[in-house]
Image: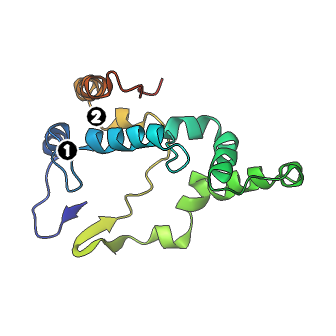
Amino acid sequence: MRSNTLPPISLDEAFELFCKGVSPFGPFWDHLLGYWKASLESPKKILFLKYEDMQREPGVYVKKLAEFIGYPFSPEEETQGVVQHIVEFCSFESLSNLEVNKIQTTKFVAPTLTVSNMFFRKGQMGDYKNFLTKEMTGRLDAITEDKFKDSGLTLPA
């Protein structure tokens, strides 16, 4: 997302700004660690989920989320396949094909920000390899490891 009043920037420039913690919403790692620490301090108020874990076992995390919000599935609901139905309904394929998500351009946050159907790319783990060089991913991993050290938060396997 970038203001319509600013000129476009290259991926390399955007990458540099991201690594330096310069973005419209602030340093990524600080936000992530803030929520991680808050989830450890208040696990009944903040549920911290990792995308890769949810991708691997979506049904487990749908049940975990239902329990977290105080509405666990009954044995009958599980037997009837309600969890699996929710997983399918909320899948990348299902959500990305909704008409509302096919709109080319949407006003977002403020009139000067435009988002072009960027919320759904491929929905695949590892797709970053198609956009970032090995040097870029190595740099991101090093920054992330440094920022997360001694926090208990780990990079996805």
Q: Is residue 88 left or right of residue 134?
A: right
Q: Nearer the viewer, residue 126 or 41?
A: 41
Q: Which residue is mark 1?
A: 11
Q: Judge from the rendering whether residue 126 lies leftward or rightward of residue 86; answer left or right.
A: left
Question: Which image quadrant: the N terminus?
Answer: bottom left
Q: Residue 32's spot in the image, x, y percent?
A: 35, 41
Say what secondary structure mark 1 lies in: helix
Instruction: Using the rendered view, name the quadrant where residue 133 is placed.
Output: top left
Q: Secondary structure at mark 2?
A: loop
Numbered label tally: 2
The kind of residue on which mark 1 rests is Leu
Work out whether 52 lies above or below 75.
Answer: above
Task: Identify the residue shown where x is 34% and y is 21%.
Answer: 150
Q: CA distance from mark 1 to mark 2?
A: 9 Å
- Sequence-first disc among 1 and 2: 1
Give x and y (percent) for residue 59. Answer: 70, 43
Mark 1 is surrounded, within 10 Å at the Cα level, by few (under 14), some (14 to 19) or many (20 or more) other residues, namely few
**Which residue appears farthest toward the front when viewing the image?**
41
Q: Which mark is residue 59?
A: none
Residue 87 drawn above or below residue 38: below
**Foreground: 17 or 8?**
17
Q: Which amino acid type is shown beneath numbered disc 2? A: Leu
Q: Which residue is mark 2?
A: 132
Q: Position of residue 153 (x, y in %)?
A: 41, 28
